[in-house]
Image (tube, rainbow, N blue to C red):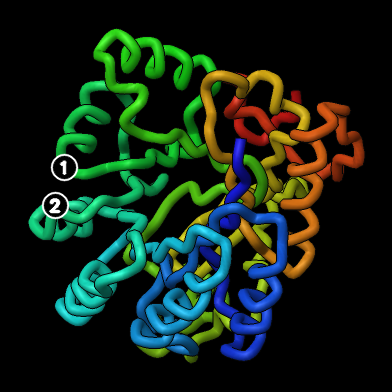
Amino acid sequence: MKVSLGPLLYYWPKQQTLDFYQQSISSDADIIYLGETVCSKRRELKTRDWIELATSMNKHEKEIVLSTMALLEAPSELTALRKLCENGEIKIEANDLGAVQILTEKKLPFVCGPAINCYNAQTLKLLINQGMQRWVMPVELSRDWLSNIIDDVHKMKLRDQFEVEVLSYGHLPLAYSARCFTARSENKAKDDCGLTCINYPQGRIAHTQEDQQVFILNGIQTLSGYCYNLINDLESMEGLVDILRVSPNSLNSLKTISHFKEQLLCKNNYTQLNSLQCNGYWHSIEGLAKS
């Protein structure tokens, strides 16, 4: 199995973002995704900057992929999407069907991102016919669900036509909204948010009345409050998963990639699990649980 570095979901200053990706080049990641996937108002790096960064990183021994936004709300966002899809060099991770449509029209291969609701083999067949080469499983699906899909795919003789990637570490992107919850939490309107997301480089924690860390607010995106961690579940992925995704939230995410690589090589249990980590969805139980 390979290990990928997923796209940065949070809003960081430009230089911090560039420094992070410069360090990622020498990390243990086999695949690096980059690009703005959450909010078009985050313009520390503009579309042109993301393409230039991806092109420069593509000269190194890594597979580089540009990720698109999951929720498009304006014509300007569609224009930016077309620029990404027509970059001419870097493969695209499509996170909505608009991106899939553009890439299909251009006859370009693509990665189907986790924001696309693909839940069965019939949908996978449709996406393969449109040019999909890799499927990133929606984060809420379980191992059993994946196993059933793979069984169906084998019966359809399609398994050798795409790779399977599973988000294996990080806060899970659970939902997107036209509202900006980070701005709302500071009593600001979305249209006058002041780009307040940049003040929360790991998102803003939302607790229940019982003080349980239930969600992370990240602009229009709602993430799981607990960090998802499947590092002790790698054996159950054998024969099902080709790529493990680590979703970054700090520079330490590059060390996490190394931990996964070490686990794959030695197959020993990595036991330093934080108490605020979970793996429930993989085991078909409540998502915030730790099996």
Give left or right: position of 131 versus 71.
left
Q: Which mark is residue 104?
A: 2
State the residue position of label 1.
130
Provide residue 185's location: percent of width, then percent of height: 56, 73
Give left or right: position of 278 versus 150.
right
Foreground pick, 274 / 167: 167
Provide residue 20's location: percent of width, then percent of height: 67, 76
In this picture, is 226 found above or below 140?
below
Determine whether the residue tagged by mark 1 lies in a helix, strand or loop. helix
Q: Residues within 10 Å of mark 2 (few under 14, many from 20)?
A: some
| Marks 2 and 1 in Cβ contact (< 8 Å) | yes
Q: Residue at x 42, y 35 (%)?
A: 163
How many numbered tags mark residues here? 2
Quadrant of residue 41 within the rendered picture: bottom left
Give the farthest residue toward the right. Answer: 272
Q: CA distance from mark 2 to mark 1?
A: 5 Å
Quadrant of residue 91 within the rendered picture: bottom left
Lower sequence index among marks 2 and 1: 2
Give the amino acid type for the residue marked by disc 2 in the picture: Thr
In this picture, is 122 found above or below 213?
above
